[in-house]
Image (tube, helix red, strand yellow):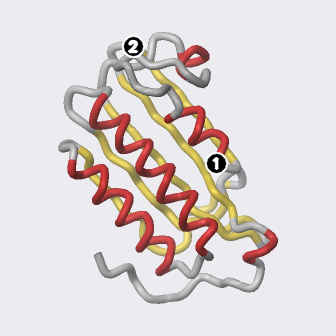
Amino acid sequence: MDNPKIGEIVGEPMLITVTKEHHVALARHIARVFCENTGLAHGVTFRVATCVSELATNLYFHTTGGGIITLAAVKRGDRNGVRMIAEDTGPGIADVDLAMEDGFSTKGGLGGGLPGVRRMTDEFEIASEVGVGTRVVAIVWRREEDAGRRFRTETAQI
């Protein structure tokens, strides 16, 4: 389905369930393979895998039941990229602006996860409601140095 803001979804989206700690590493691996199989260069692959790792970490450590990350190859005009959606039905974030500040953490971590994801992506949105959950949508677009790369047609082997 086309969405003028997101673009056209190319191929089948990949759903990754995160409910256990080892799912964080698995999510990072799946993201890397997904990007490689869509023909994206190492720079895009690295950024997506790192963002997915951070989002999966949040799903595991900051919710009671984990959540789901959806990866989709997207195309807008002549641009190719990967859209990541991380969703949970956890406790929600009381102050999203504060959570987006470098160094803020509710669990004693470094507080770089969500701000880092925002910096590594080209488009970033977060919505959260206390008692309902949180949804993060982020897109990484292929950069100029990756202009010769195209999506391949094979499916990820995961």
Residue at left offset 70%, top offset 68%: 142
Q: Position of residue 1 (x, y in %)?
A: 56, 63
Disc number lying in front (1 or 2): 1
Judge the density around disc 1: few (<14), some (14-19), many (≥20) Cα neighbours within 10 Å: some
Q: CA distance from mark 1 to mark 2?
A: 26 Å
User: Quick check: 58 above or below 158?
Assistant: above
Look at the numbered disc 2 and give the secondary structure of its residue.
Answer: loop
User: Quick check: 21 above or below 83?
Assistant: above
Where, by quadrant of the figure, is residue 150 drawn?
bottom right
Q: Position of residue 32 (x, y in %)?
A: 44, 68
Label tally: 2
Residue at left offset 39%, top offset 13%: 130
Look at the numbered disc 1 and give the secondary structure of its residue.
Answer: helix
User: Quick check: 94 above or below 21?
Assistant: above
In the shown orientation, is residue 135 left or right of residue 137?
Answer: left
Q: Nearer the viewer, residue 111 or 23?
A: 111
Q: Position of residue 15 (x, y in %)?
A: 33, 58
Residue at left offset 30%, top offset 25%: 90
Give the residue type at disc 2.
Val
Residue, far right: 144
Judge the density around disc 2: few (<14), some (14-19), many (≥20) Cα neighbours within 10 Å: few
Question: Which residue, given by chain and number where applicable, does mark 1 sit on?
Answer: 120
Question: Which residue, given by chain and number where applicable, does mark 2 sit on?
Answer: 130
Q: Position of residue 134 (x, y in %)?
A: 42, 28
Give the residue type at disc 1.
Met
| Quarter in which the C terminus is drawn | bottom left
Q: Are marks 1 and 2 in contact (CB under 8 Å)?
A: no
